[in-house]
Image (cartoon, grey):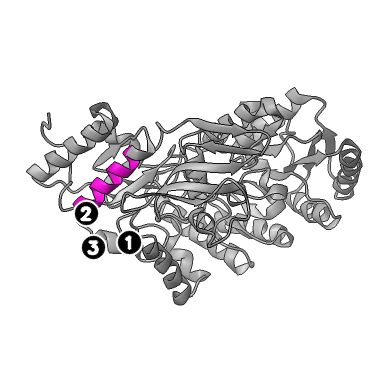
Amino acid sequence: MPYHRSVSAARPLPKSLPERRLLRELERIVGASNVIWRPEDLLVYEYDATIDRGAPEAVVLPGTAEEVAAAVKLAATAGVPVVPRGAGTGLSGGAIAIAGGLVIGTSRLRRILELDPANLVAVVEPGVVNADLSQAAAPYGLRYIPDPSSQKACTIGGNVAENSGGPHCLAYGVTTNYVLGLEVCLASGELAWLGGRVPGLTGYDLAGAFVGSEGTLGIVTKAAVRLSRLPPAVRTILAAFPELDQASGTVSDIIAAGMVPAALEMLDRLTIQAVEPAVQAGYPPDAGAVLLIELEGLPEEVEAQTRTVQGLCRRREAREVWVAEDEAQRERLWAGRKGAIGALGRLAPNYYILDGVVPRTKLPEVLRRVGEIGARHGFAIANVFHAGDGNLHPNVLFDERVPGATEQVLRAGAEIMRLCVEAGGTLTGEHGIGVEKQDFMSWIFTAADLEAMQRLRRAFGAGELFNPGKLFPDARHCVEVGFRIPKVANLGTGDFM
């Protein structure tokens, strides 16, 4: 499992009447069973899937948009920081409460409110699991395209907050390309619709601004999203190469040939050695790297592209190139890719997953240098990533029990992020900035750029109380030295009944 480093802890204050009153008001809004305040119950809300940890002082689980609004309004009146949280699968620390305060979870808001096959639209609550939406749409011949590897657990609200991607976003785009409109709860507790149910609405694209805002502008309470028709033909190809460079070069060859596959994924030797014993996906265990290539479209087009891709792979001396024979075999190939991160636990007790983007043509060079960084710091690095759009996910394997290992891992991670930027890329393709990479934002944005973003935050009325300490440089420092929760610190002390 990933290593978790403590960022902050709840700062206990003596019991007081305002504390008890706030807790009772939250219970009145959502019911006593949906307010969590005992320290032992809060433990599971201290972290997401990344390296940082922060303890909330209470968690509230609303069951309706109106309950979300009432809880937010109550927190705003009390001056309490609010942290929106979906399924907790995020990989940048976006859902952790580094300033303490109140976590508002959306796990109970899990209804698909409307499925409109004729207009290719679904309206869902934020707690709907990503894979469940495609499963509900499948009987109509439809699907929801964005498919993070955590799609069986992650939720639409979190996907909107992080502008999530996935293997099939190479050809079709990421979450922002599928959001038509959002009902959001602003920091004031007001519910407002941004956008609508059809594309091309007039006025400012406020829904577009909200997607990827990482919970700093408000909380999604409903989303109108675009559905897509299932393709008439699909071919999934596995190509195994002796070396990583050959696989990386093939990625550029495929795109240069005028094709944009639905998915173009890569796993290196170390990842294959973890995945294959666990999943038995069919990856050759001694390969230097494998490419998983999926082609979609009309049958004639897909067959022609399949032949072209097979030829390009063999030109780069692929040892094996084969097409999945049936749906069961295709599912096994994808089970290996989507289970790859979890399988790394077979190799080391801890891993630190990174997320950066580089130009496709720089993949061979960047991957070599990633390996050099790992060797210099004394860590093995397993690579599994969206090769088609240059979205890297180096996984630094380590053991937190070794003195100094964690600090060394963080230094290696910073070097890898700097490498991505210097190669002409950027800091994140789908995991967001959160706490993890906020100090790196000045590498790609000027002070004026960052101030313009901060002004947008203020225009939404969010200020510093909505998901404080995230996204921007120095935000965490400002929280640690400047934020004290005046009315709700350590809600878990004492008897509030």
Q: Which residue is mark 1?
A: 463
In this orientation, does residue 471 appear?
yes
In this orientation, does residue 46 appear?
no
In this view, the residue in front, 492 or 31, is 31
User: In the structure shown, which secondary structural element does the residue marked by tag 1 occupy?
Assistant: loop
Mark 1, residues whose alpha carbon is within 10 Å: few (<14), some, or many (≥20)? some
- Image location (x, y in percent) of residue 269: 68, 42
User: In the structure shown, which secondary structural element does the residue marked by tag 2 occupy?
Assistant: loop
Mark 3, residues whose alpha carbon is within 10 Å: few (<14), some, or many (≥20)? few
Q: Amino acid at mark 2?
A: Gly
Name which of mark 1 and mark 3 comes first in the sequence. Answer: 1
Q: Amino acid at mark 3?
A: Val
- Image location (x, y in percent) of residue 226: 62, 43
Measured Cα–Cα span from mark 1 to mark 3: 17 Å
In this view, the residue in front, 215 or 222, is 222
Q: Which residue is mark 2?
A: 79
Q: Which quadrant holds the C terminus?
A: top left
User: In the structure shown, which secondary structural element does the residue marked by tag 3 occupy?
Assistant: helix
Which residue: 66% across, 37% down? Answer: 272
In this view, the residue in front, 205 or 414, is 205
Q: Is residue 200 above or below residue 326?
A: below
Q: Is residue 222 above or below residue 457?
A: above
Mark whose residue sits in front, 1 or 3: 1
Q: Which residue is mark 3?
A: 481
Dominant secondary structure, magenta:
helix
Measured Cα–Cα span from mark 2 to mark 1: 11 Å
